[in-house]
Image (cartoon, rainbow, N blue to C red):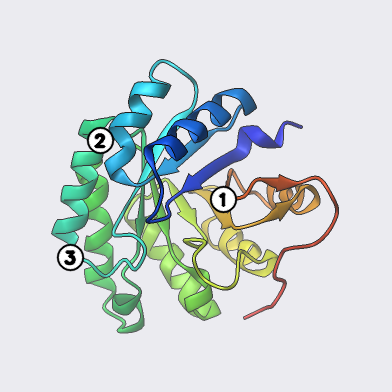
Amino acid sequence: MDINSFLDFSLLHASTTERDVINLCNDALNNNYKSICVNSCYVPLAKQLLNATPVKICTTVGFPLGAVSTGAKVFEAKKAIKDGADEIEMVINIGLLKSNNYMALLKDIIDVKLAIGETPLKVIIEINELSKNEVIKACEICLDAKADYIKTTTGLTNKGTTFTALKIIKKTIRDNAKIATSDDVLDTETALKYIELGVDRIGVTSGIKSSKTKFINEEVF
């Protein structure tokens, strides 16, 4: 199995340079990555380098906190599509979820989805900030909003994706949406386990380790 074909390679540091993005695009082409994810200011550069190639260009909106206004997310998403993005990742408004303001959270996601049309939308639910019941509720809202992917985390928290969370997400969404993950460092064995559990896209920032050393956090809710 070519694990690289599942990889979404992210480069979202504030200090990311044009040269960093150029190197990432070259790596993506040479290693058969599924997509790259860059800050929106670099979408035009990535489009120039990856145009007419199989590598998808993804960018984030409302990143990393998800607490900006819905209008701001919509504007970011539309601009990114115009600049050449193939996929959009948005972060949910965690505060709205924890406030039980489910209608506002639903509208937040729906408005972005409507703004980008057929472009795939990945909704980051940031599992490490949520209880088990909140993960389930977030997934249900994402389904109602017709999100294409539910993504576990931004990758910026101290904990990565867990097998436990993936099982909960998969049980909740079944085959009604796809699953994406995010981790700083990942080993081959864990990546294969992700795929076995139903993960469609594996987000990384530091590549895949070939050893069987475990980097996964198995802590349950």
Q: Residues within 10 Å of mark 1 (few under 14, many from 20)?
A: many
Please tell me the numbered disc located at residue 81: 2
Which label's residue is closer to the chain start, 3 or 1? Answer: 3
Residue 11 sits above or below residue 93 on the image = above
Side of 184 relative to 114 (left or right): right
Question: Disc 3 designates what residue?
Answer: 69
Indicate the quadrant where residue 51 lies: top left
Q: Secondary structure at mark 2?
A: helix
Which callout, 3 or 1, points to the residue nearer the camera?
1
Please tell me the numbered disc located at residue 53: none
Residue 38 sits above or below residue 143 on the image = above
Residue 111 visible in the picture:
no
Side of 116 relative to 163 (left or right): left
Q: Cα distance, mark 3 to mark 2?
A: 19 Å
Indicate the quadrant where residue 6 lies: top right
What is the quadrant of the N terminus in the image?
top right
Please tell me the numbered disc located at residue 205: 1
Q: Residues within 10 Å of mark 2 (few under 14, many from 20)?
A: many
Which amino acid is tagged 2? Ile
- Residue 209 x/y as whole percent: 76, 48
Side of 55 relative to 121 (left or right): right
